[in-house]
Image (cartoon, rainbow, N blue to C red):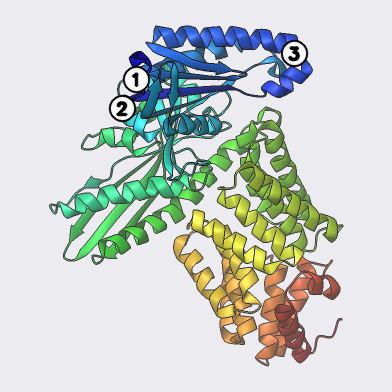
């Protein structure tokens, strides 16, 4: 009896689960059982080889415990490498992949049985892993970093089902086995559909004040968190990049060692009550600089200063990364594009907003990205934005069908990743066109809560708010402009400010912002419409009629009826009255 007395011990728990097991059983039961048995034997062999113990193996799940986190992670890496090698020649439908989760926690051991929350955490981590992938908790990664041949990508704090407190999660993958493998992996990261990795190096403190060292480190930590929130680019964790702190390294060296395509470098220097932060984004493969900026601020509340600088940096770096990736994708023949490259082709067409054909092409690229990677939530989200563009510019052949398609794509995106800010942004746009404004506002606010730097969400929120709360809409758009002063959509930001000022009755301000919008881009029919209305309210009839004539040339398909259907009543009323005052009665 004494032998079976329950005892507590710290252990690394490995949970492995077969992906698509039920579906495969339905297709070919005998072959699936045979494959599962062979894989279990392989996993069990590696567990024993790494001094672990298989505790439970029921159905398509296997649970093992290790006295050492290093042994558990090494075992998992060996298992996934071997299973991938075995199935490399099989067609996709015949492959049986495993997800693995690893956690270090306190267990209650009673005979051959183990109990405890650590088992539940490992199982939840396993569910987060990609097929053929590994996820581990921070408790594990802290023990193994530098001791295993693996790379770690910080996925941030995750709220796991039935686990009260958030858990910091890392994706674990094997290091490249050769220089050629390392170069290839720069643009093909497992689980990220070929997306390039970003490494943010510790910023150099060029001053003598030790307090600025904390500021420099804090900026980098916040940058990692903020860029990770976009859910588009995997960002190397702080634990990996801070190994370079205090060292002079070349971006290409960092790129090779961390398998990161892009490297962010920077410095902090303070003097006479001011601080200067310099940042540059470098292509780690080619070695050339993509973006560089200097930020000068007054020294004051350090936390407020840090937030301000980080938001400004992210607002510039994220668009620069997008432009670099879209340029790279444009150089590749269309038949050879992967999911990420298809996704990058879309925004060139979508946000160019030159014609219906270009929006249709963008939608097709986003659909292809989803076909190539069915878990690509952001590609689904941008399908919604494409349908919203067709509705906004009166290019939709069937508005009701476009609204339904926008809602379906948004809901699909959320089902894939409920923490993707693009998915919530998509839902906001879809609901705004469906007339569900409270739900649209909630969706945009949730997107901004997840990612405070996503300017597309600010723009959508301002559109919805402007009808009844124009001053709130103005504050939202002014923040978007502060966040991304070089945004490629600045002409639309200025236009949205003009709309809010028009509805608020500040016609001079509306004219000022629309003229600035036209300076940035002249072929915008929606801008000419609002500009004409503002001129009309100001009694500048000749200028109003001239703007309306330009609108007609740019958008000959314009109809007042469609304009009424696709805009708020507040905007429609202001525009119709302004046009009437100018003497334009085309309706």
Q: Nearer the viewer, mark 1 or mark 3?
A: 3
Name the outermost residue toward the front: 1
**CA–CA distance between discs 2 and 3?**
40 Å
Of helix, strand and loop, which one carries label 1?
Answer: helix
19 lies above or below 478: above
x 27%, y 34%: residue: 244
Q: Position of residue 341 (x, y in %)?
A: 62, 36
x 40%, y 37%: residue: 288
Instruction: Name the one closer to the observer, 310 or 442.
Output: 442
Q: Which residue is mark 2?
A: 143
Which quarter of the picture shows residue 499? Answer: bottom right
Q: Quadrant of the C terminus?
A: bottom right
Q: Which residue is mark 3?
A: 29
Pointer 3 local density, CA inside 10 Å: few below 14, some 14–19, many at least 20: some
Of helix, strand and loop, which one carries label 2?
Answer: helix
Q: Which residue is mark 1?
A: 70
């Amino acid at each position: 009896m004494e032998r079976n007395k329950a005892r507590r011990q710290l252990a690394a728990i490995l949970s492995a689960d077969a992906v698509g097991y039920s579906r495969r059983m339905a297709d070919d039961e005998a072959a699936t059982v045979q494959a599962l048995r062979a894989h279990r034997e392989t996993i069990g062999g590696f567990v024993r080889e790494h001094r672990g113990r298989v505790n439970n193996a029921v159905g398509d799940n296997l649970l093992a415990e290790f006295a050492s986190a290093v042994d558990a992670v090494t075992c998992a890496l060996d298992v996934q490498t071997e299973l991938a090698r075995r199935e490399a020649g099989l067609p996709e439908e015949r492959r049986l992949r495993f997800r693995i989760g690893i956690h270090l926690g306190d267990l209650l051991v009673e005979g051959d049985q183990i109990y405890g929350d650590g088992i539940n955490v490992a199982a939840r981590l396993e569910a987060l892993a990609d097929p053929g992938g590994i996820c581990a908790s921070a408790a594990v990664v802290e023990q193994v970093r530098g001791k295993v041949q693996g790379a770690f990508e910080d996925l941030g704090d995750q709220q796991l089902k039935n686990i009260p407190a958030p858990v910091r999660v890392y994706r674990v993958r094997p290091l490249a086995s050769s220089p050629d493998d390392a170069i290839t992996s720069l643009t093909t990261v497992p689980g990220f559909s070929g997306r390039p990795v970003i490494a943010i190096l510790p910023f150099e403190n060029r001053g003598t004040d030790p307090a600025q060292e904390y500021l420099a480190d804090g900026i980098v930590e916040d940058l990692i968190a903020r860029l990770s929130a976009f859910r588009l680019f995997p960002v190397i964790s702080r634990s990996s990049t801070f190994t370079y702190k205090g060292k002079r390294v070349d971006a290409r060296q960092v790129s090779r060692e961390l398998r990161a395509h892009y490297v962010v470098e920077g410095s902090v220097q303070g003097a006479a009550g001011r601080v200067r932060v310099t940042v540059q984004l470098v292509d780690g493969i080619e070695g050339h600089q993509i973006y560089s900026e200097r930020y000068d601020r007054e020294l004051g509340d350090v936390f407020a200063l840090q937030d301000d600088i980080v938001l400004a940096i992210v607002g510039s770096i994220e668009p620069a990364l997008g432009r670099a990736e879209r340029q790279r994708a444009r150089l590749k023949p269309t038949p050879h594009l992967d999911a990420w490259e298809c996704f990058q082709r879309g925004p060139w067409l979508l946000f160019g907003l030159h014609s219906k054909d270009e929006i249709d092409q963008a939608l097709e690229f986003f659909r292809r990205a989803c076909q190539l990677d069915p878990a690509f939530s952001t590609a689904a989200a941008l399908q919604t934005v494409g349908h919203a563009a067709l509705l906004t510019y009166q290019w939709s052949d069937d508005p009701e069908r476009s609204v339904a398609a926008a809602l379906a794509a948004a809901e699909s995106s959320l089902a894939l990743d409920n923490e993707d800010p693009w998915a919530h942004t998509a839902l906001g746009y879809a609901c705004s066109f469906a007339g569900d404004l409270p739900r649209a506002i909630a969706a945009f606010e949730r997107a901004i809560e997840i990612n405070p730097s996503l300017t597309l969400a600010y723009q959508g929120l301002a559109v919805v708010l402007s009808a009844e709360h124009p001053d709130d809409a103005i504050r939202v758009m002014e923040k978007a402009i502060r966040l991304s002063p070089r945004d490629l959509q600045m002409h639309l930001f200025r236009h949205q400010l003009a709309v809010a000022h028009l509805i608020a009755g500040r016609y001079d301000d509306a004219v000022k912002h629309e003229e600035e919008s036209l300076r940035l881009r002249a072929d915008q029919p929606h801008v000419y419409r609002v500009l004409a209305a503002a001129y009309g309210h100001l009694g500048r009839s000749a200028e109003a009629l001239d703007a309306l004539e330009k609108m007609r040339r740019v958008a000959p398909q314009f109809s007042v009826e469609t304009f009424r259907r696709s805009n708020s009543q507040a905007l429609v009323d202001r525009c119709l009255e302004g046009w009437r005052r100018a003497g334009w009665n085309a309706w």
